[in-house]
Amino acid sequence: MALKSFPMRRGLVITYLVFVHLFAVAGLVLVGGFFAIRLHATDVKGSVDPNSPEYSSSVLGESVEHSSLEPSFGNDDADSFEELDRKFSDLSKARRVRAENLCSIAIVGRFAPVNAKGILAVLKTSGSDPLVAKMLFAAKIRLEDSGHGEPFRECSGDPGTVPDESALLDSLASASGTNLFPWMNNEEWTAIRSAIVKDGEAIERAATVAGVEPRLLVSCAIVEQVRLFHSQRELFKKVFEPLKILGNANKISLGVMGIKEATAIETEAHLTDPTSPYYLGDGLAHMLDYTAGSDVATERFKRLTEDGDHYYSYLYGALYLRQMLSQWEHAGFDIKYRPEIATTLFNVGFPQSKPNADPKVGGSGIKVGDAEYSFGSLGYEFYYSGELLDAFPFVIGR
């Protein structure tokens, strides 16, 4: 009997050894992941977007302010001739910009009437030509990449070469078709869009607390979700799409905002350190405090990965973003109106947040279908796409 049972015992020993080795390998992977995070080996290095120099043009560096075609002259006789000349010059420039914008909208309408209609609607409701110029820039980049950039050379800014505004409005009134931005023409975007709107209250609350524009925070969240959904197609099909919920990332990048544990810890530390370049002041110093005696690591993980309520995930994301925006502002570089830079920094993190006069657009590469995007370029495209304006409007004139 003992001899007959030897093969069985040998099999059990082999099975046991296999399991021991598997657990050992798993342990090494987990330990390696732990130290990789602690030593910042998982930090996103990213790459520079090929269109990065284009984003740095002067019009994109301006703040988004309400722009009127009719500057006020008033009845003040004290106005000097120099002041009047300046006002007439401003009026002339404003009319040229408006003419160029209308011409560009008409050209976008040839290829993507739905987008042209949305841009014209923003122009009608806001009157802001600088804002519309940025929306048009996003469209031009996409059209140039698809070989349709040449017609924009027609727009010289001469009022005589552009269509009548009312006629343009009428021609686009019944516009239909696909979106100019390909990543918005699929089921992943439909699911993300629906879920983000459902999270609107939590997003608004977190953005208000942190002092960032909700639409900017949403831009970061949406790109993170696009990256997640397109890298986990099977999971999207089985879970996210049917339930119209956002992905909760994984154990390295946590929650709907994809915040790493190390980044969350740094964000907490900067809030309470007055010597930190990311310090936001006493008013926000205790925003992420824990109750005495709590298991901080467990509580932090729960905050970031809570399925039912994403408020803390958005709050960490908003504070993290605000800390870098504040760092740049204190260094003399205001980037709160540059979503392509803000979203790039959100992706690459604190180690690569180095204020300078010529920041680069880029970050992680994201593949959607056959197209390759950078994190920052997708952030810019969503921000100025006109999508979700009812839920997360532009902040103008602040």
Image (cartoon, rainbow, N blue to C red):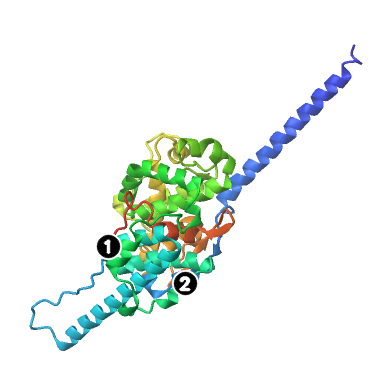
Q: Position of residue 249 (x, y in %)?
A: 52, 43
Q: Quadrant of the C terminus?
A: bottom left
- Give neighbour class at mark 1: few <14, some 14-19, many 20+ (Cα, 10 Å): few
Left or right of 291 in this view: 396 = left
Mark 2 or mark 1: name the one nearer the start of the chain. 2
Q: Secondary structure at mark 1?
A: helix
Per the rendering, the mark at residue 54 is 2
Q: Position of residue 131 (x, y in %)?
A: 33, 65
Tell me the distance, in whole angstroms, between the alpha carbons under discs 2 and 1: 26 Å
What residue is drawn where x is 38% and y is 36%?
Answer: 292
Task: Classify residue 2 by image quadrant.
Answer: top right
Name the residue type under label 1.
Lys
Task: Classify residue 235 by image quadrant.
Answer: top right
What residue is drawn where x is 16% and y is 74%?
Answer: 72
- Give neighbour class at mark 2: few <14, some 14-19, many 20+ (Cα, 10 Å): few
Residue lying farthest top? 1
